[in-house]
Image (cartoon, rainbow, N blue to C red):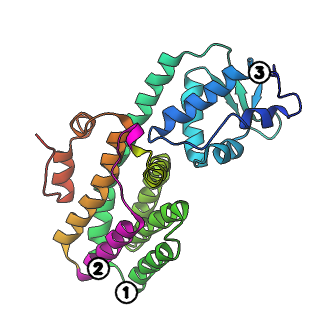
Amino acid sequence: MTGTAGTSHMSDQEAQLSLLHPVESTRIFETVGEQLISMIERLGLSAGDRLPNIAELAHALDVSKPTVREALRILERSGVVRVQRGRLGGGVYVSQDTVPMSIVAAEVFEVEDHILHLLAARRMVEGLASHLAAAIASAEALDAVERTIELSKRHHAEPAMLVRTDGMFHRAIARATQNEVLEKTVAGILRQLMPLRDVWGSAARLSQTGKDQAVGAAPSLTADAIISLHERHLAAVREGDSAMITEILDEHFSWLEELFATASGRGMDELFELAPRELIGSLTGRRTGRPK
């Protein structure tokens, strides 16, 4: 590695990590990518130089490993880095000295479109799971859903744990359908949406520190609101109230979709040109279409 003055007392990776800081932006992929590119440029790294591993980068940036992996995929497709698998020689390496920022921006846009399609699929698949659970779930299966709510209450003040328990809640609803394929589909969608959950966490931190106005105010969903949504959702499933299930799901999904719209800097109308909400509504029983 070609180091900079003042870093000789550090190891290469320590010098690199010292230039990274927790992400304070709802534009997660763009911000992570910008920090990594800035680090490469400031330290004068060259093609072949090795970067810290994914776990170290995630810790320094205070984001999840799935978010770092997605950001690295963007940079890899842009020609900035190379991710090599395997025990021997595996790791993240610089690919070239010059950084094509316009290509990086285009790759970020493509990833955002993929997330939009995931959000649309989530409406359809989780809507089906909730209505099916209301029809056939056993009392024991719904008790398991309730335990995830109790976990949320226990970890009320821990944003990272609250994100995890939120995912557990939705997976438990899907598991209550007794349909293994449906359960795995919901779990797969949630797993791919993990980077968007970092947007949630970052927005929460910005709100707590009063910095959210600096990046554009994002919709806020507090721990109390999340727990209330889950309690009302479970109650509607227990009672078999299809209309209430639809209303609560829309409230939950709309929040994440609006957060994504804020983070991507695109309006809801523009976003849902790719996956029309009126079509999704017809499939899930959603009662309101896309705004005109």
Q: Residue furthest top?
A: 98
Disc number lying in front (1 or 2): 2
Q: Which residues are magenta?
A: 213-239
Residue 241 vs 104, above or below: the answer is below
Find numbered disc 2 in the image and state the secondary structure of the residue it sits on: helix
Query: At 77% across and 29% down in the image, what residue appears?
Result: 50
How far from the left and from the top, in percent, is residue 163? 49, 61
Residue labelled with disc 2: 235
Q: Residue at x 28, y 36 (%)?
A: 271
277 is higher (above) or lower (below) than 12: below
Out of 177 and 76, give the one closest to the viewer.
Answer: 76
**Disc on the earlier residue, 1 or 3:** 3
**Which quadrant of the rendered structure holds the C terminus?**
top left
Q: Amino acid at mark 2?
A: Ala
Q: Which mark is residue 78?
A: none
In the rendered image, which quarter is residue 74 located in?
top right
